Image (spheres, grey):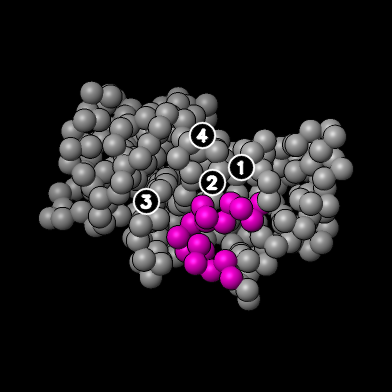
Amino acid sequence: MTSTRVARPVGVVTRGTTHPNRLRRVDRWIVHATAADLRRSADPLVVDLGYGAAAWTTRDLRTQLRSIRDDVRVVGIEIDPERVASAQPWADDTLSFVRGGFEIPISAEPIVIRAFNVLRQYDESAVVDAWSRMTSRLCREGWLIEGTCDELGRHAWWVSLRAGQSTPVSLTLSTRLADLQRPSDLAERLPKALIHRNVDGEAIHELLVRLDKHWASAAPHAAFGVRQRWIAAMRSLRESGVPVLDGPARWKLGELTVPWNFS
């Protein structure tokens, strides 16, 4: 794969915190959401932007995507040249690492870009520009998945955008249900575009308030397990008028996905 030379990558160096399987929640959602497009793709190329101080999550992503296409190629992109150099021992015909940022300095158009725990340190005002830069590099059927998770990957939020767009399609919460007290406790991990909007009068605040209410009302279902409680909460949340997407097969994983315009 030929890289495109750039004078200066767009972005700043992140903290680089990473762990094996830290992004397993978003990876399995990517497999679910993008499978049809990946199967049809003439060039199943995927980018992991800002993989951090070690290449674990880039390698994990390739492993997950091979369940759809065994010929998938994954490119890890990092703005820190030392991180790119340290990842090279893992490179092979389907896994490579290059220096870059939001400009995505590769010659081909990826079908998926995953950018996790990257925008967290930026100002909210920088988010839309970053989204636009990344989605402009996607192929026509491409996806951008951008979000945030905790250090161990137990709780995560992300948005999905399509090629050429600067407004997300959906917002997803994925959490380890065994640890869950109140869904609104997870607000501290909201994507950068929403974390400062969790206040009265904002849609994301209203969503979290309603989610807490339905989670509490579903407490009797806990006798059948925490997954059944979450599924019951998702059903009642949908019945209340919230356009909850997907169904029990996703909900039992601790997921909630709603259209972006409801957040």
Q: Which mark is residue 156?
A: 2
Q: Quadrant of residue 134?
A: bottom left
Vertical relation: 139 (above or below) 89: below
Measured as percent of width and height from the top left, residue 86 is found at: 21, 30
Residue 68 appears in the rendering: yes
Query: Does residue 239 belong to the magenta stretch?
Result: no
Q: Earlier in the sequence, mark 1 or mark 3?
A: 3
Measured as percent of width and height from the top left, residue 22 is found at: 46, 35
Q: Which mark is residue 175?
A: 1
Vertical relation: 232 (above or below) 159: above
Q: Residues within 10 Å of mark 4 (few under 14, many from 20)?
A: some
Measured as percent of width and height from the top left, residue 131 is found at: 40, 60
Magenta region, main secondary structure: helix
In contact (CB < 8 Å): disc 2 and disc 1: yes
What amino acid is at disc 4?
Arg
Badge 4 is on which residue?
A: 24
Badge 3 is on which residue?
A: 118
Q: Earlier in the sequence, mark 1 or mark 4?
A: 4
In contact (CB < 8 Å): disc 3 and disc 2: no
